[in-house]
Image: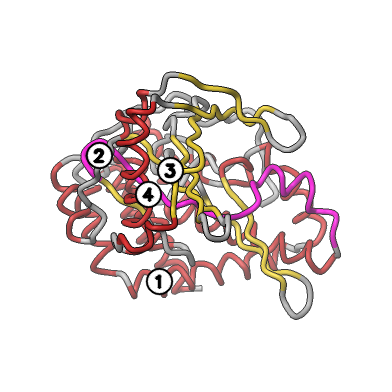
Amino acid sequence: MQEQSREDVPSRKKFFYPIIDPLRKYLVKYDREVKLPVQYADLLRFNLHTPLLNKDGTDTLWQTVYYDQSEMRELYPSLTYIYALLNTDGDVHVMEHLSVARIDYCTFGNSRPFRIRIINRLNDNYDHFYIKVADASRVYGLELEHIFSPNRITYLSNENTLIEEHIAGIPGDVFISTRLATTKFNQIRICKEFVKFNERCFSRLLGDMRSYNFVVDITPDIEGNQYRIRAIDFDQQTYDGKRKMYLPHFFKENNVLVTLGQKYLTETTVKQYQEEERSLITHRLRMATRRLNSLLEVMCDEQIAPQEKVVQLASELGAYHNTEAFKKCHTMGQILSEHLNLILTRSKLV
């Protein structure tokens, strides 16, 4: 993790790829496809919006949106029902004490999501979920996160709409600016987790993991804290042609974490943590072999990136792995399948 580049930037304008029938069948098979009472387009019918500011008055780049009373009477009960679908398999009894507290809309980024705040009127506790335009790249990203990472992912799909759970944690950029002034012991644990996160992203080819596209979950432990870095943006799943875009340590936004790692970690310990994570990934994949194979079978036949990016990534990974195998790859799914085979085979041989 010593090499860095400030020149490479990920693709800013990403194409949206529709969910094709084979992927839809996969979603049905694994209980991701559910009939929804509200589609993404329905939420676009707001008639007023105001900037959403954080506690110190800074613009969050989100807009709080408002609807006519007639729209609210139809929309809000449907949103609480979606929350029940997401969290309790549609048990409507939990809806009695739930209501929509706020709807926010973000025009920053590719997916233009709506964030729904649900509040429990009995104790004022609140939760969130997101409504986005369904994009095949993002669906593949969510599924691969569910299979590869130590975390389970909850989401639902229907027609052109995607419902996602809120992933709790401190935004990476906020964490870097406010939480790194801690003990040496905690800093070493942060560095270890960043190495492992870097390995997870590269293994499953998840790109654009700059600090504001992941969160840090902190768990107090017997001594110090445990840290878990979790991706929250999956739009750049096997989309970019540059190998470096799948390695978070190359982004300048993450330089502080890289510098901290250079301070505390040796090349030997970095390799140890990388092998530990590959071993864990191998174990997770053994537990979900059938599911992963079903996903890759669909993914290998679908175009989810411009062809020039497919050619570039095949070339760069071929050079990285020192193999001609990628020359036979014509889709990002085929590239990922070959890449996985090489990464995990290498892990077994070490």
First in residue order: circle 2 vs circle 4 = 4
Decide which of tag 1 and tag 2 comes sooner along the chain.
1
Of the numbered discs in the image, which one, if any, rests on residue 80?
A: 4
Q: Amino acid at mark 4?
A: Thr
Disc 2 element:
loop
Q: Residue at x 77, y 65 (%)?
A: 188
Kindly report which numbered mark, 3 or 2, lies closer to the viewer in this rendering: 3
Marks 2 and 4, how far apart in space?
Answer: 43 Å
Measuring from the top left, give residue 181's x and y in whole percent. Answer: 85, 54
Mark 2 in CB contact with mark 4 (< 8 angstroms) = no
Secondary structure category for the residue under label 3: strand
* Residue in the image at 35% along x and 57% along y: 84
Q: CA distance from mark 1 to mark 4?
A: 33 Å
Identify the disc placed on residue 330. Answer: 2
**Going from the N terminus, do you reach mark 1 or mark 3 first?**
3
- Please name whichever residue, 31 or 145, is drawn nearer the observer in this view of the structure: 31
Q: Between disc 3 and disc 2, whose residue precedes? A: 3
Magenta segment boundaries in residue numbering: 158-182
